[in-house]
Amino acid sequence: MTHFENSQPILRVRSMAASLEYYVNVLGFKNAHWGTELFTSVNRDHAGIYLCQGNQGAPGTWVWIGVEDVAALHEEYRTRGAKIRLPPGNYPWAYEMHIEDPDGHVLRFGSEPKPDLPFDEATF
């Protein structure tokens, strides 16, 4: 069987400039050197997301991104002014928080569940 290398969602954005401002300066991603005003890739460590201005995809897409420590990331994003849609909660699948981008896309960041905390009820 063919080996899968990775997966990167493509998110439709209204304004590449506004999206790059948010993803780079607030969320800490880096813009690809080959990016244009219509299509680019933003990456942080091994996580990547394609951004496409006015084409491909639909507003309000949800994306899962696994991270080492959601609590630390929550603090980083809180101090940088990220739009925190759901603060960290403990669920059977992950310790997870939700961040919303300027186009209403939801980034679900999750790390291992906290064994010392009860599970929250998922209402999303």
Image (cartoon, rainbow, N blue to C red):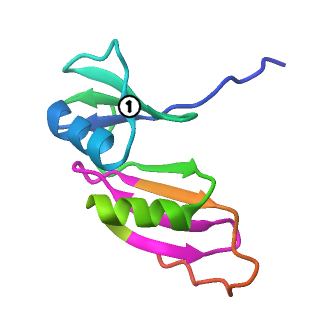
Q: Image quarter for residue 15?
A: top left
Residue 92 located left or right of residue 49: right
Q: Is residue 6 visible?
A: yes
Q: Amino acid at mark 1?
A: Lys
Reply yes or no: does residue 73 show up in magenta: no
Q: Image quarter for residue 6?
A: top right
Q: Which residue is mark 1?
A: 30
Q: Which residues are magenta?
A: 86-106
Reply yes or no: does residue 102 show up in magenta: yes
Residue appearing at x 52%, y 57% in the figure: 109
**Up-down: is 23 above or below 79?**
above
Image coords of residue 42 (percent x, y): 39, 31
Q: Is residue 83 visible?
A: no
Q: Quadrant of the N terminus?
A: top right
Residue 35 located left or right of residue 50: left
Residue extending furthest top? 34
Label 1: state its secondary structure. strand
Image coords of residue 98 (percent x, y): 43, 63
Residue 62 located left or right of residue 59: right
Residue 48 located left or right of residue 28: right
Camera-side residue: 10 or 94? 94
Q: Image quarter for residue 28?
A: top left
Crowd tier of the residue under label 1, counting other residues whose Cα lies within 10 Å: few below 14, some 14–19, many 20 or above? some
Residue appearing at x 68%, y 85% in the figure: 117
Camera-side residue: 92 or 80? 80
**Up-down: is 82 above or below 7?**
below
Image coords of residue 70 (percent x, y): 55, 63
